[in-house]
Image (tube, rainbow, N blue to C red):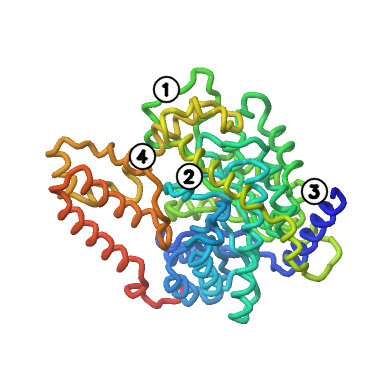
Amino acid sequence: MVASKYAKRGLMQSEFTQRANALPAHGLGLSVDVYSPDLLQLVQALRDAGLEPGYLEVFKATTSVLQWVRRQLPDSTLTYHGEGLWSTQPDFPQSNSGRQGVAEACAQIAALNSAWLNHECATKQMAGYAFGTYLPPLYTDLSARMTAQNLVYLQNQVDEQARERGITPALVLLEMPPLTYFGCGTSGIPEFFRTVTGRAACGLVLDIGHLWTLYRYTGAWQRQRLEVFTDEFLDAFPMERVIEIHVAGLAEFASSDGLQDEASSALPYWIDAHGAPIPSVLFDLLDQVLSHPRLISLKGAALEVDTKPIAMIVEEFRRFRARFESTVNEVQQNRCASSPQSPVTDRLAGAMQILTSDERAALQRQYGTYVEFVTTQDAASMAEDLSLLGGSLEDLNRYRDCYLPHELLHWGGELQDMFPKTCRMLSEGHIPLERFVPFWFSRPRPEQDDYDFFLLKIDRFAEFAAHVCPPAAASVKAEAQELRDAYRVANEPAGLPEVRV
Ligand SMILES: [Fe+2]
């Protein structure tokens, strides 16, 4: 049993090594959004400053917009940052995310000609409930095995669709997600990723800011220095699978002012914030990560800069290049993976370890409990079933009482701006908009075709307003339709000029 476990781990590693060795070094890049800031303006500003990035990792948009990007930047190396692939969830292969979502991701990989498909090891959809931002997986052994199984499925789909298109298959990369005030589970986070990589030949993305949030919200900062935590973390983490490194900004959440900070708190309540400046502590951490001897598969390091002002991106990329270009090049060239080559393993070997239907059902139930845990006021009584990964219930309260309502009420558009007439009617009926939050989580709902928070918010609010204020039903329906139509037009490239940069 033990021998076969190690044999399997070895096969996964050699399949990974073969795929990783086939990837070209990408150098220093930027992970960007097409719209925010405007991608072509950003590229022009970088060129004007003599700072051409080695590659651009482009966040999911519509496939036609990504085809347009490819045409405008014919000489650039482009990679793909996926979204909406909920591979941590037990129903992934059967879900819309696992079917249409994966097919769309494959089309977008082909549009960009990307060498990899990066996706956060996190979800915005679980047990029938949707969130605006990512929730990390349950950090348990069962959940890691489920994620690995889903990643094998995902890589198989990517391979199959690439074969049909006659292109080289992209390698699936799993990004370790940040903690936004809390994490739940019983296993360590490095151990979770070790279990995943022992069962799936995927690569990993190590995000330096995410690593900092682990130090902050597992409570490790109260016991040890950041350098010591990082050393221990990296030694336990499957560093040999890290293909890409991300660095992005961190910032305190804008609406957390009302919350009482602990008097003893020595560290800020920073969370992942791509639009915020990169604190210097992250570049110091990056030095430490780049010097790790098991970082042997690195193919790129990117600043994640969506929603950041162009001038700040140019300045940060200048500093990033000046400090890390030679080290990253050296790591890419001299520490290449050296495991012996072997033929790509038939992944049917993994069939022996497919989760039973009981295990999947148990995990599905645990994700239902997880939703209750993070959305209801009664979290303390549920702590017996689900433990926090260190940190405190107070930190979880910060997420539930402040961050989560803000996400639903204000993100992706202010409700008053989106539905002015309906909001007036609700106000005249003395119905506070805050009631939208418990309504959102009042019951599970079927998954939408394609996860899109803006469209989801429109649908849910239309349902909410018609429910709590029947006279507003017609007005909210009309306003919702107007928003959907405008959104569809804004997301198509019809209005985008064909100007090669
Ligand atoms: Fe990232």
User: CB atoms at circles 2 and 3 under 8 Å apart?
Assistant: no
Chain-order first, disc 3 or disc 4: 3
Q: Determine whether label 1 and label 4 are within 8 Å by CB.
A: no
Q: Which mark is residue 293?
A: 3
Can residue 326 be seen here? The reply is no
Q: Residue at label 2?
A: 273
Label 3 SS: loop
Residue type, numbered disc 2: Ala
Question: Gap between marks 1 and 4, in whole Å?
Answer: 17 Å
Q: On residue 260, which mark appears?
A: 1
Q: Quadrant of residue 383?
A: top right
What's the residue type where badge 1 is placed?
Answer: Gln
Q: Is residue 110 visible?
A: yes
Q: CA distance from mark 2 to mark 1?
A: 21 Å
Residue name at image x 49 percent, y 59 percent: 32
Kindly identify the residue that appears in the image at 44 percent across and 28 percent down: 378
Q: CA distance from mark 4 to mark 2?
A: 15 Å
Place of residue 61 in the rendered image (x, y in percent of width and height, measured from the top left)? 44, 65
The numbered mark, 1 or 4, whose residue comes first in the sequence reads 1
Q: Residue lying furthest top in this view?
A: 263
